[in-house]
Amino acid sequence: MAAVTPESITFLQTGWVTVRCAMLSVRLVQMIEDHAEELTRGLIKTLKANSRTPHYHNLTYEELHYRTYSVYRNLGQWLSHKSEEPIEASYSDLAKRRFAEGVPLNEVVFALISTKNHLHDYVRSVGLMDSAVELHQERELQRLVGNFFDKAIYYTVRTYEREAGFPHAKAATAPAGHGR
């Protein structure tokens, strides 16, 4: 059997989506997806109690569960999209919903950051990082997750500002698929 190195890449078939990840990253993604319910419950508890997210205290458990669970349960799909269009569509919808619900933008962004941080904390807590190769693979997963959330926050803020009627929001539109 060949040694596992940062260069040894495997492909995970998740339905119709192919995710290119290092072998441990694939295991981590699968573990995250398998524990999506637990991760979701923990994050909702945090959002409902955090003083920085008071408007989230009034959102239904079901609404918060739907959004959060979708991210954690389908992480492999989110990370594998070649196009930003699915991220743009989903997070533009989130921005419209939160704007209509009267949730301030700073709380929406804080909730997205909390979702990412909750995921990072989970990955660190599973304790699979025993070697330099595993640490490298964890960092690669963290980079992919960070890129995903960067795009999610960008499209959320852009759409929220448009909904709010900020004059500069309409002028600052770049087509999907550009950037990182």
Image (spheres, rainbow, N blue to C red):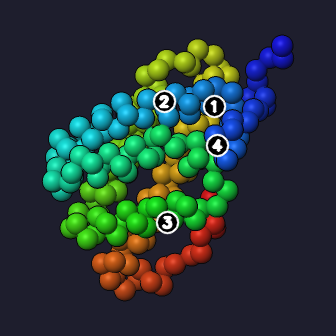
96 and 15: which one is in front?
15
Q: Which mark is residue 34?
A: 2
121 and 66: which one is in front?
66
Secondary structure category for the residue under label 2: helix
> How many angstroms separate mark 2 from mark 3 (CA)?
25 Å
The amino acid type of the residue labelled 1 equals: Val
The N terminus sits in image quarter: top right
Secondary structure category for the residue under label 1: helix
> In the rendered image, is residue 26 in sight?
yes
Q: Earlier in the sequence, mark 4 or mark 1?
A: 4
Residue 112 in picture, x, y percent from top left: 37, 51
Q: Earlier in the sequence, mark 1 or mark 2?
A: 1
Q: Earlier in the sequence, mark 2 or mark 3?
A: 2
Viewer-nearest of discs 2 and 4: 4
Q: Which mark is residue 15?
A: 4
* Residue 84 falls left or right of residue 104: right
